[in-house]
Amino acid sequence: MSSLNRRSLLKASVSTLAVLLPFGAVVGQTSSLSDLGTKVIPLPTVTVYTAREVLTLDPAKPVVDAVAVVDGRILLTGTLQDVVDTLKGQRHTIDTRFADKVIVPGFIAQHDHPLLAALTMSSEILSIEDWVLPFGTVPAVRDKQDFVERLTKAVQARTDPAEPIMSWGYHPAFYGPLTREDLDAISATQPILVWARSCHEMILNSVALEIGGVTQELVEGLSPTEKMQSSFAEGRFWEQGLFAVLPNIAPLAASPERLQAGLELTRDYMHAKGVTFGNEPGGILSKPVQDGINAVFSSPDMPFRWSFMPDAKSLVKAYPDDAQVIAETENLSGWYGGMTSLAPKQAKLFADGAIYSLLMKVRDAYLDGHEGEWMMDKSDFDRAFRIYWDAGYQIHVHVNGDAGLDRVLDTLEMNLRRNPRYDHRTVLVHFAVSAEDQVKRIVDLGAIVSANPYYVTALADQYSKVGLGPERADSMVRIGDVSRAGISWSLHSDMPMAPGDPLFLMWSAVNRVTSSGRVAGPEQRVRAEDALRGVTIEAAYSLKLEDEIGSIEPGKRANFTVLDRNPLKVDPMEIRDVKVWGTVMEGRIQPVEATERKASLMEPTPVESSRAFAEASFQHALKVLHYHL
C-alpha cells in the first residue's frame, strides 16, 4: 500500500484550495509528498456519491449523506450541500445511484483461508448448515437419506463418467457413519470422494480407491498410527491416515483448474458479502500453490485486495538460525503482486489446540477428564516469539483455551520486560475460552483480540453438555467483558470454519443466539455499532491498516460496502438479513450480480498431471485444519 498515509493527506488539506488542486490529482499515485511537485497531470473529476445515510465511523462526522472521491481516495465527507459548496467550481459529478442505500466502511475479512475455502466451495456442498452462495442457497442436509439422494442426483447430472465427484460437508455426528459401501451404491463407475465437514476425514468409493492406487497392501505398509487411522474396507481415512494416502488421492480432488474454479467462487462469495479487503493468516509456503492463488487473487479485476501473513511456526521450524528466519520471512514478499501482498512485519504463531475438536488447553479439566494439546512446544513457541518480537513484528497468536491464553500472556509479559516495545498490538486470535482475570492482563499488556463469535452460535449448546459445561460454554468469546475494558477487538470467520459473512458475524456477536434459539451469556453481547467496528475499523487496526482503510474519512482509500438497510437501526435479529448491494473498492463501483456459477468441480485434468501441485494444495489445507479442528 502507498506510504502516503492519512496524516500526510490531512496535512496537505489545510486549506480547501490545497485539497482540491494538485493534491487531489495525484493522491492515489504518489508515494510521498515530495513527488507532488514533479507530477503535471490534468486535474481529475471528483465524484460525489450520495446515499440515504453514510455511516463513516469518523467521530468528527459519524453520519453524513455525501462522500467525495477522487483517484480512489476519499476527498471530503459531509452534507451534499457542504460538499458541493466546498468543491465550488471544481470539476465534479454527483452520482445518485446509492440515494436509497446505506453506505458503510468496506468490510474487512480479517482472518480467512482462501485455498481451503476454494477446495471446499468447489466441491458438491452437502453440509450441516446452509451456505448462501452467489448462485443461490445450498440448503443444509436433513439426514443421511437426504445426503444420499442429493449426492446421487449430482452424480447423475455429470456427463463425463470419469469425472471425480467430491462432496464436502458430511458430518457423522449428525447423520451417522458413511462407508465405501454407501458410496458404491450411488455409483460403481464414477469416482466419489466425500470430504467430511471437519475436513479431517475422507471416504472414497471403490473406483476412486482403484484410480488412486490405494490398495490393502498399501494400507498394510503404513506406519502403526497411520494404519490405525485408516479403514480400507470402509474406504475411510482420517488424521494421519488421510495424510498418508494424500499423494494417491489428491490428484482426484485438486488441480490448477479446480483450484481456479474454487477461488473464483470464493472471490464471488466474499464480494457478495461486501468484503473489500482480506487476510490469510499463516500463509502458504508452496510457491506453485501461491502462484495458483495469485492467478485469481492478484488479477486487476479482483473486487478486493488480499494480504498473506507468514506462517511463523513453520518458518522457525525450518531454519535453526534466527537471522535466517527473518530473512526467509521477508523474502516471501516477492511471491505476491497486483491485488495480493505480504502483510508487512506481521507473523502468525500457534498456542494451543482447536475448539472444534475440544483440544484447547484449559485451566479446569474437561467434563470427561481429557486434556487439550499444545500446537507448539514451549521452547519452540518462546524462540519464535522472541525472534519476531526482536525484529519488530506484530505477532498474531492462535489461542483458544484459558490455559493457552496464560502461556501467551506470560510470554508477552516476559518479552515486554526484556525488550520493551510500544504499540506492539499482539493479537489474540479466536479467543474461545478465557477467564475474567485475564481481561485485565490483556489491558495491562497492550494486547488486542480477534474473536470468532460463531463459536457461540454453533457450539455453546453442545459444549454445555460435553467438554466445557454450561458456565464455560456460555461465556465463550467474552467480547462483552473485553469491550467494557476498552480493549480493541475485531471479528473474523476463519472461512470456511464459519461462513465468511461480516453481517452474520455481527449478528452472532450482537445476539449470541445458539442453534437451539437461546441466548448464551447475554452479558457478553455487544452493541451493533461496536460489531460494525469489529468488521471495519477495528479489523483494520488489528492489521495495522487503520490509516488506510476501515472508516470513511478524507485521505483513506475509498472502500465502501453498500447495503439496503442500516444495520444499526434494524432489529438486532435482522442484522444478518440486511442485503449487500455491492461495494466500492478504491473508487471502483462493483455491484453484486447473480451468476450462473455452480458449486461443483470443473473438468478435471488427467490424474498423472499436476500431482505435486495437488498434494501441496491439500497439504496446506490440512495443515490449516490441523490448527483449527
Image (cartoon, helix red, strand yellow):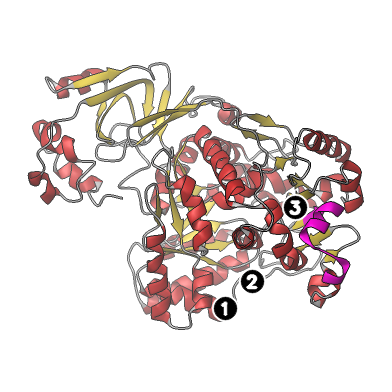
Q: Which residue is mark 1?
A: 378
From this view, report whether residue 498 is shown above or below residue 56.
below
Residue 469, position in %: x, y?
Answer: 75, 55
In this picture, is 579 found above or below 211? above
Question: Which region is colored magenta?
Answer: 202-218
Q: Is residue 231 above or below residue 535?
A: below
Q: Secondary structure at mark 1?
A: helix
Q: Secondary structure at mark 3?
A: helix
Image coordinates of residue 245 in percent, x first then y, are: 75, 65
Query: Would residue 238 be counted in the magenta stretch?
Result: no
Secondary structure at badge 2 equals loop
Q: Which mark is residue 374?
A: 2
* Residue behind mark 3: 463
Image coordinates of residue 527 in percent, x first then y, are: 50, 37
Residue 348 horizontal side relative to residue 85, left or right: right
- Residue 65 seen in this snapshot: yes
Q: Amino acid at mark 2?
A: Trp
